[in-house]
């Protein structure tokens, strides 16, 4: 049959389009290997303007590589900064980038390789100690401005010790360093670090006063720095009686001791620079203050010297001072005379007015007095007994001149004087008769001689 297969011929292979083949490979990979977790070292990490991240995962031995893409949303949830050479575990789906026909991993999650469990333990311990108040910012103490003695806790073989001592020698050679050696890595490190901090605390309490303690070591992985995440070490740092500066690892490394310490330094060298002020800068500031003090003292002395010169000049020529005193006295005398003249002139100008006011006041006073006198005279004249006598009344009195107001005071045969308006009568009493209304009240006196 034409167009059929001859006996012994192999069937023809299927002819694929490029796009279809790439898509089919991608579907096969997605079905066979997705999702998957790949372990490798980061190489060429870049973050695009869109926020997506692109990098290559290389085999630890450098024999293979896999291109990776991580979209912005997934990359924003990564809790560390991906860097060159960092060993990580990437979880995602395999796909084929059709434009180039390249195999790539669409990363959905990224974490440091081998550190996942440790990091979770780190977060749990951090949350518990923070709830207890071990990391409370209010308990942080300020560092002394000019320390005299500093304790250092680190390994004798650590490069960090050399960095700290070099920085202290350069910045503050006068500061005494008390070294408390301890292992900074491995299972034996936590108890040795606790003992070193305890020995410095005991030394401080026994009289060898420390101004601060530097706890330091160089950088490393999370496992290398794990001794500084040990709960015993963290509590020992928080309980230290003097301020603690923690300079563990590099700037990106964070340990729980950083939170418990009074101050965190990005590196051991930075810890030494923070705890000890630069001697040269302090001396320069001191020299500036001394210069300012010298300038102000010199200015004050110059002022006093000028005053002293003026006083000495006056004392050297007493005649001049006496002449100035005479001039001052003459000026005061002239001012006194002028003031007296002005006062007298004002008084003379005021005198006529005062005299006129006095005359008017006296006239008004005299008028009021005359009016009062006239009124009193009228009242007095109305009370004059002579006016009563002129109306026909008489004033009777006994021989002694005592007035008689009642018939009871007169006896028959007595002599009574009667004063009239125009003279006096000598009267002889022949009888006494009481008024009818008073008959019951007054009784007749017996006649004299009865």
Image: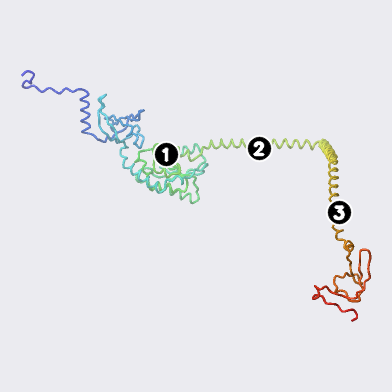
- Residue situated in front as seen by the camera: 402 or 115: 402
User: Distance of mark 3 from mark 1, alpha carbons?
Assistant: 126 Å
Looking at the rendering, in which quadrant would you find the N terminus?
Answer: top left
**Sequence-first tag of 3 and 1:** 1
The colour style of the image is rainbow
**Sequence-first tag of 2 and 3:** 2
In the picture as drawn, the residue positioned furthest to the bottom comes out as: 450
Where's residue 237, x and y in %? 42, 46
- Residue situated in front as seen by the camera: 201 or 388: 388
Q: Secondary structure at mark 2?
A: helix
Q: Which numbered circle lies on residue 297?
A: 2
Q: Which residue is mark 3?
A: 374
Residue 148 in sight from this viewpoint: yes
Looking at the rendering, in which quadrant would you find the C terminus?
Answer: bottom right
Q: How many residues crowd mark 2 within 10 Å: few (<14), some (14–19), many (20+)?
A: few
Q: Who's the residue at 86% across and 74% down the image?
A: 409
User: Distance of mark 2 from mark 1, alpha carbons?
Assistant: 48 Å
Q: Is residue 144 left or right of residue 353?
A: left
Q: Which numbered circle lies on residue 160?
A: 1
From this view, report whether residue 230 is shown above or below residue 288.
Answer: below
From this view, report whether residue 201 is shown above or below residue 272.
Answer: below
- Total numbered circles: 3
Q: Secondary structure at mark 1?
A: helix
User: Distance of mark 2 from mark 3, alpha carbons?
Assistant: 92 Å
- Residue situated in front as seen by the camera: 149 or 127: 127
In the picture as drawn, the residue positioned furthest to the front comes out as: 436
Residue 322 in sight from this viewpoint: no
Task: Say which of marks 2 and 1 sits in front.
Answer: 2
Where's residue 165, x and y in %? 46, 39
**Sequence-first tag of 2 and 1:** 1
Q: Are marks 2 and 3 in contact (CB under 8 Å)?
A: no
């Amino acid at each position: 049959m034409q167009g059929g297969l001859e006996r012994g011929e192999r069937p023809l292979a299927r002819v694929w389009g490029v796009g279809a083949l790439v898509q089919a490979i991608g579907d096969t990979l997605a079905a066979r290997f997705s999702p998957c977790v790949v372990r490798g070292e980061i190489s060429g990490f870049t973050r695009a303007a869109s926020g997506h991240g692109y990098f290559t995962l290389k085999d630890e031995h450098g024999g293979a590589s896999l291109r990776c893409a991580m979209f912005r949303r997934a990359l924003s949830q990564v809790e560390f900064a991906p860097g060159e050479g960092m060993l990580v575990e990437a979880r995602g789906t395999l796909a084929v980038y059709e434009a180039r026909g390249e195999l790539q991993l669409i990363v959905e999650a990224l974490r440091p390789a081998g550190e996942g469990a440790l990091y979770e333990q780190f977060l749990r311990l951090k949350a518990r100690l923070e709830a207890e108040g071990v990391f409370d910012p209010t308990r942080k103490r300020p560092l002394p401005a000019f320390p005299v003695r500093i304790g250092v806790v680190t390994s004798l073989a650590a490069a960090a010790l050399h960095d700290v001592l070099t920085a202290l020698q350069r910045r503050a050679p006068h500061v005494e360093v008390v070294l408390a050696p301890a292992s900074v890595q491995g299972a034996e490190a936590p108890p040795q670090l606790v003992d070193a901090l305890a020995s410095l605390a005991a030394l401080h309490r026994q009289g060898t006063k420390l101004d601060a303690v530097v706890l330091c070591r160089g950088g490393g992985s999370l496992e290398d720095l794990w001794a500084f995440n040990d709960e015993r070490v963290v509590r020992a740092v928080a309980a230290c009686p003097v301020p603690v500066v923690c300079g563990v690892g590099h700037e990106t490394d964070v340990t729980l001791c950083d939170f418990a310490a009074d101050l965190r330094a990005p590196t051991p060298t930075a810890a030494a620079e923070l705890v000890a002020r630069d001697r040269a800068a302090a001396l320069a500031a001191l020299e500036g203050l001394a210069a300012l003090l010298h300038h102000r003292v010199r200015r004050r002395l110059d002022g006093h010297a000028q005053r002293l010169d003026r006083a000495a000049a006056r004392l050297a020529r007493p005649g001049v001072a006496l002449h100035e005193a005479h001039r001052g006295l003459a000026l005061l005398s002239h001012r006194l005379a002028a003031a007296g003249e002005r006062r007298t002139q004002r008084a003379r100008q005021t005198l006529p007015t005062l005299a006129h006011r006095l005359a008017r006041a006296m006239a008004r006073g005299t008028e009021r007095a005359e009016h009062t006198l006239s009124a009193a005279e009228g009242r007095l004249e109305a009370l004059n007994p002579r006016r009563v006598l002129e109306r026909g009344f008489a004033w009777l009195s006994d021989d002694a001149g005592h007035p008689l107001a009642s018939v009871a005071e007169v006896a028959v045969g007595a002599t009574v004087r009667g004063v009239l308006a125009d003279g006096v009568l000598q009267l002889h009493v022949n009888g006494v008769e009481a008024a009818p209304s008073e008959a019951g009240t007054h009784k007749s006196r017996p006649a004299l001689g009865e």
